[in-house]
Amino acid sequence: MWPDFDVWVSVIYRCNAAAIAAACVAADVDCQNVWFHFCQGKKMQRIRNQTLMMSASRRVDLDLSIRQTVG
């Protein structure tokens, strides 16, 4: 699990589609359906699994881009 998974979770819990999309694009990660699935009531496990499948470097990149997007 990546170090700041809670930051990613908080962005998703707020259903901030713009922040999620920007973070995914910046990290070059294909997670276009993350917002849709989560905000439609799907389980967090789906997002957690997708995140854990990323390489360690991608997770770090995504974490950094989320921090920049969220501020």
Image: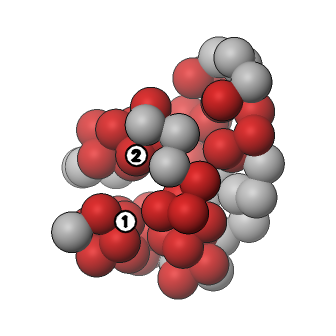
Residue at 43 percent of width and 37 percent of height: 14
Q: Is residue 61 left or right of residue 64?
A: right
> Secondary structure under badge 1?
helix
Q: Is residue 70 above or below residue 34?
A: below
Residue to which mark 2 is pinned: 11
Viewer-side residue, 9 vs 40: 40
Q: x, y percentage for residue 21?
A: 61, 66
Residue at 60 percent of width and 22 percent of height: 45
Q: Quadrant of residue 24?
A: bottom right
Q: Amino acid at mark 2?
A: Val
Q: Are marks 1 and 2 in contact (CB under 8 Å)?
A: yes
Q: Is residue 29 above or below residue 11?
A: below
> Secondary structure under badge 2?
helix
Q: Is residue 56 visible?
A: no
Viewer-side residue, 61 vs 9: 9
Residue at 66 percent of width and 29 percent of height: 39
Q: x, y percentage for residue 31?
A: 70, 57
The label shown at residue 36 is: none
Q: Is residue 66 visible?
A: yes
Q: Amino acid at mark 1?
A: Ile
**Neighbour class for label 2 at 10 Å: few (<14), some, many (≥20)?**
some
User: What is the CA distance from the residue labelled 1 to the residue labelled 2?
Assistant: 8 Å
Q: Is residue 48 above or below residue 51?
A: above
Residue to which mark 1 is pinned: 66
**Neighbour class for label 1 at 10 Å: few (<14), some, many (≥20)?**
many
